[in-house]
Image (tube, rainbow, N blue to C red):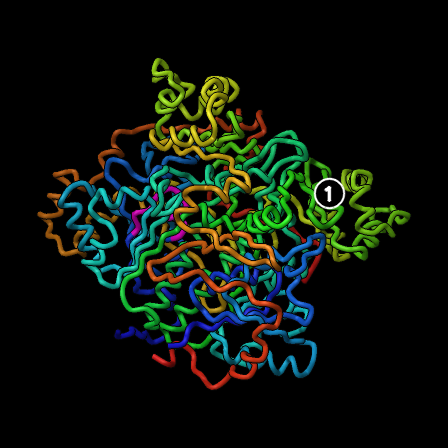
Amino acid sequence: MAVEKFQFEVGSLPLSGVRIVDLSWAYAGPSATRTLAELGASVIKIESPRRPDGARALIQDRNESHPDYWNRGLYFAEKNLGKRAMTLDLTKSLGIDAFLRLIRMADVVIESFTPRVMENFGLGFERLVGEQPHLIMASLSGYGETGPRRNRPAYGSALEPEAGITFGTGYLGGPPVKTGLAYTDPISGVLAAGAILHALYEKFTGLRDGPLFIDLAEREAVLPFVGEALAEYQIEGKLPNRIGNRHRMFAPQGCYECLDDGWVAITVRDDDEWRILAQAIGIDGLGLMEMEERRERVDEIDSHIAEYCVTRDRFEVMESLQELGIPVGVVQDGRDLLSDPQLNARSFFYSVDHPVTGERRYHRFIGSSFEEWSMQSTKHAPLLDEHTDQILAELGYSVSEIEEFRFTGVSGNEIASLGRSGPTLDLEWLLEQGGVSAMDEPLGSRIPSVRQSGSSP
Amino acid sequence: MPPLRILETACGVMGPFSGSLFADRDADVVKLEPPEGDWTRNPPGSTHAGLFHCINRGKRSVVIDVASREGRAQLQSLVAWADVVIAGSELVAAEITDDTLSSWNADVIRSWILPFGLSGPYANYQAESIQLLALGGMMHMTGDPGREPLQLPGYHPEYIAGIHAFTAASAALVARARFATVGQRVETSAYEAIAGSAEMAVTMYVATGAVRSRFQGRQPWGIQGEIVPCADGYVAVHPGAKGELLAILIGRPDLLEEPLLLEPQYRLKHIPEFVTLLGPYLSSHTRAEVMHDCEELGLPFGAVLEIPDLLEDEQLEARKFFELTDIDGTEAFLPGRTYRTSNDVDQRPPAPSLGEHTEEVLAANSGTKRVEESM
């Protein structure tokens, strides 16, 4: 197989010239293709003209009334930076025709429907490979593309319990607790990006000749996280207890309240760290206790640490104890993250303009940075149907043919004119109930100032 | 054509999990261990090496004491052999810098995996899993509003960072292959990996000024996996996009227009009534029965599965997900590949014993070319 080799130019990104067709929606798949777009790929997002990506409806700006419902969701905006979008009805032959033209030019196709859907469209892997023999196809699903439960519908927030994670999470003596997150989605998204990058590496080097199908079950992607508990059960017959914020090996470990509703998480990993911490918080007399004794007297120890923390600022506790080499972390919220000195020093945030919502601050989805390039999108998340005509023209359709797409409803954004209003967040109610812990004026295009850190590298 | 060559110098979970994702793809992963072995072979407070066996399948183990002069020379020759070096706090402690690695092999991709990365004001901060969950924003969003924030026990940030590092190193490999350029430094920060995965913590604040907080597993835009008791445990109630299906699920077609079932925000504000409405159905059905009904209807519920349930899960079994492993004389089923491809062959070989491949690797680690040169 002939291998494309580009001359390296300043500003070249690893996926420059790589074409990705993206049928995925909601969180996991779109976050994968956002990361791939940041690496230089040309990503074309395809949405149904009658059922656009539901993420478009989530998290609308407050105190703003705007008729452009489908283009205002910030949930969608952060997951689709750097892409182009078109509408295409894949239940109609004209839609299939355009889709197959895209596939013939594509390196990668990614989708996240329940497994029967692509087959129902007549667009399974075999069919697509018939059009593009070197195609990489990534299918993301809850439970996988094979097996008796493959067609179970699934979202990331219900897969966390299905992966055995929730059962082991909770307060001491309490019921199982789920995170407040679509936990498996962002993890599966970065993994899917990695799977696609690895497949492209094999293609570019000739390690693999021919197509590749990637079957990523979100539940299986996070099952290794409970691997130790699986081993423990089979070797020792022991099941994990819910241990609150304690550690299975180290003591003490906990989450302690500070001034102004702040919290810090503190861990003591060995006898030296305990001696140092005991001295720092003024209980030198207890400093010679060994791990076993600390585990037995952990409630007493916790009350001493709690007493120390409760009169102090959370960042002061972290910085002064980190100075002594003790693992301490402030419990940060979204507002804290935006002004965090470490994240800001490492280019974690950047601003991108958007034609409807204006300039906004976004964060990287991947925890990695590169010596040779930065991971920043410059293009806003696409409006519904924004690039349909442009892309159809690139596929070789004439102006009158493109009109046919619109006339027959294969493409279009009529749904936008229906002016649907979606679920509005009742932020005042959430604030009252605790689902929102504080409320400021919306940041808009402003860039928050960076918190001054007391310590230096 | 020789496989991709990964030199894994980091111990623990982050680096080795990243290495295992390459081993899953049939890379030649050489795992460097100190004379006493990776600590996951014998975790403090544990009596077995289960953790080690979970994340080190398909690798070769080489024992090198990098503090000795001989060990350093051996490390240098292995760096010269590798396509990717996975580097963590062990190399930082041995004062082997990124510049040193690139001076030993200009083509090698240095995949650093650290709690906070190599630079910035927190670069030297200490962190276990709970500090990363706390700083990264996940703990603030987990637990009850009136109580302390809650961790996820285990090594979640370490596993997540391992995934991010695999993806990042793969991106650098693509760049090197396509542009015929040299290696580069890639840094994965577990803190950034968690902050990047803390759903809508940042963006909701930017958009609305509201700080997302812990809300018993609920999302501000609705119930998405409410943990509710059923006949034999708990299920995660997720209405999906079609709330009217809930009326059919609970056998109450008279409630097809009930706002409690239909409207996400109304549901969220009346959770006790919502749960009471579902109560008679849930308390008389097992998790398996609930999940069966939900699959028929297209409702995206989940069951709260316990460890033994996973081992008996028909879907995981049909997909042959678990791999049977001998852990010091006891057989156990451990998690398999995180994703699979149409090119996968058999199961990966088991994790190596300490130093199992020291001789063979050190004897034959030079004289062959890296993947792109042999094209």
Is A38 left, or right, of B310 in this rendering? left
Residue extending farthest left? A400
State yes or no: residue A356 in magenta: no
Residue nearest the observer in this picture, A245 or A124: A124
- Measured as percent of width and height from the top left, residue A169 is found at 60, 39
Look at the numbered disc 1 and give the secondary structure of its residue.
Answer: loop
Is A317 left, or right, of B203 in this rendering? right
Q: For the point 55% across and 69% down, which residue is it?
A: B8
Q: Which residues are magenta?
A: A22-32
Q: For the point 76% across and 46% down, which residue is it?
A: A252
Residue nearest the observer in this picture, B277 or A420: B277
For mark 1, what is the residue?
A313
Q: For the point 31% across and 44% down, which residue is it?
A: A115
State yes or no: residue A30 in magenta: yes
Query: Can residue B270 be seen from the camera position used here?
Result: no
Q: Which quadrant would the C terminus of chain B be assigned to in this image?
A: bottom left
At label 1, the amino acid type is: Asp
Is A452 left, or right, of B185 in this rendering? right
Q: For the point 36% across and 33% down, which residue is it?
A: B295
Q: Chain of mark 1?
A: A
